[in-house]
Image (spheres, rainbow, N blue to C red):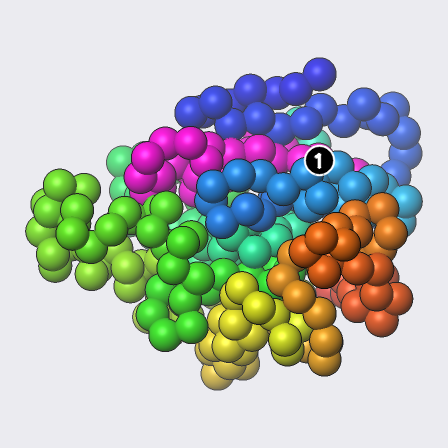
């Protein structure tokens, strides 16, 4: 069974609803794909991996087909978090995002209470309803400036030459770009964002490692709890870095060293939240 939400977002149902999970809370898995597609390698295999460690885990699927996405994926994710809280009241909700999906997860972490998109009472109490309790971000898209993954940013706000059509003016386009550049948005934020676990490889060939470094540096500057792992080797999109999700034609090979990130992330969840 699949739960359908706003703008055709979907959230996988918990077929193990009667199961007593070892740890409280739900991990929402958000696949990447440059906001152009949703990677199956970053979907159910990851949810299943978290389940083996005793966490309920659901897969969130969001819009990647609208020509200029703007805030549709973010509003869809806010629905998914609120829906999860409704289904499992009193339990934490964690986000596990990959690449563009990690950008989406971190965007909600930074902008959950922002008037730019929540100012028309989408949610009356965003701090308690749609703010994630914790975020795990794998090789995240972060910046819209130097070191940007331009394809992801373009899917959200379109091309500069279409700025007036999409946003009304060049100035509004630049404002949207700064809003989506999460290290800049975080630097201006007064309220605290959720704790994060972030990992990436130094040799990421699609999203430069500077993306995660920029965000982590800003978290450290603002004294926000973060655990950060940089692995020395590996291409972009390794997912679990196991045989199950290997993709040899893209050099996404099993790597036992990088694959340790999952156990590290689980340990972080337990250490940070499972009191």
Magenta-colored span: 56-84
The residue under the point 84% across, 65% down is 255
Q: Is residue 136 above or below residue 62?
A: below
The residue under the point 62% across, 28% down is 11
Is residue 73 rendered magenta in the image?
yes
Q: Is residue 25 above or below residue 241?
A: above
Residue 228: x %, y % from top left:
66, 74
Horizontal placement of 139 versus 248: left or right?
left
Q: Is residue 10 above or below residue 50?
A: above
Residue 49: x %, y % from top left:
84, 46
Residues 207 and 27: in front is 207
Q: Is residue 181 above or below residue 23?
A: below
Horizontal placement of 107 versus 66: left or right?
right
The quarter of the rendered structure image containing the N terminus is: top right
Residue 131 visible in image = no
Horizontal placement of 150 versus 271: left or right?
left
For label 1, the SS is strand
The residue under the point 31% across, 39% down is 68
Residue 88 visible in image = yes
Residue 196: x %, y % from top left:
62, 64
Q: Disc 1 designates what residue?
A: 58
Residues 25 and 30: in front is 30
Q: How many marks?
A: 1
Residue 82: x %, y % from top left:
54, 34
Is residue 89 rendered magenta in the image?
no
The residue under the point 12% across, 59% down is 171
The quarter of the rendered structure image containing the C terminus is: bottom right
């Amino acid at each position: 069974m699949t739960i359908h939400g706003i703008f055709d977002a979907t959230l996988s149902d918990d077929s193990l609803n009667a199961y007593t999970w070892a740890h409280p809370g739900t991990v929402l898995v958000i696949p990447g794909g440059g906001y152009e597609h949703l990677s199956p390698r970053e979907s159910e295999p990851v949810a299943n991996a978290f389940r083996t460690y005793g966490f309920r885990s659901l897969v969130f699927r969001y819009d990647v087909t609208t020509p200029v996405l703007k805030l549709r994926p973010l509003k869809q994710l806010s629905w998914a978090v609120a829906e999860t809280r409704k289904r499992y009241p009193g339990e934490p909700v964690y986000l596990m995002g990959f690449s563009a999906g990690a950008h989406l997860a971190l965007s909600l972490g930074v902008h959950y209470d922002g008037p730019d998109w929540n100012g028309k009472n989408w949610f009356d109490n965003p701090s308690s309803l749609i703010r994630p309790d914790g975020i795990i971000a794998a090789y995240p898209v972060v910046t819209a400036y130097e070191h940007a993954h331009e394809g992801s940013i373009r899917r959200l706000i379109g091309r500069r030459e279409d700025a007036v059509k999409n946003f009304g003016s060049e100035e509004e386009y630049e404002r949207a770009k700064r809003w989506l550049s999460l290290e800049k948005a975080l630097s201006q934020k007064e309220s605290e964002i959720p704790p994060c676990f972030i990992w990436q490889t130094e040799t990421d060939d699609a999203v430069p490692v500077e993306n995660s470094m920029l965000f982590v540096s800003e978290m450290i500057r603002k004294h926000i709890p973060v655990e950060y792992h940089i692995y020395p080797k590996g291409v972009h999109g390794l997912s679990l870095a196991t045989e199950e999700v290997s993709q040899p034609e893209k050099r996404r090979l099993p790597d036992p060293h990088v694959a340790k990130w999952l156990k590290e992330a689980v340990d972080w969840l337990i250490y940070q939240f499972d009191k």
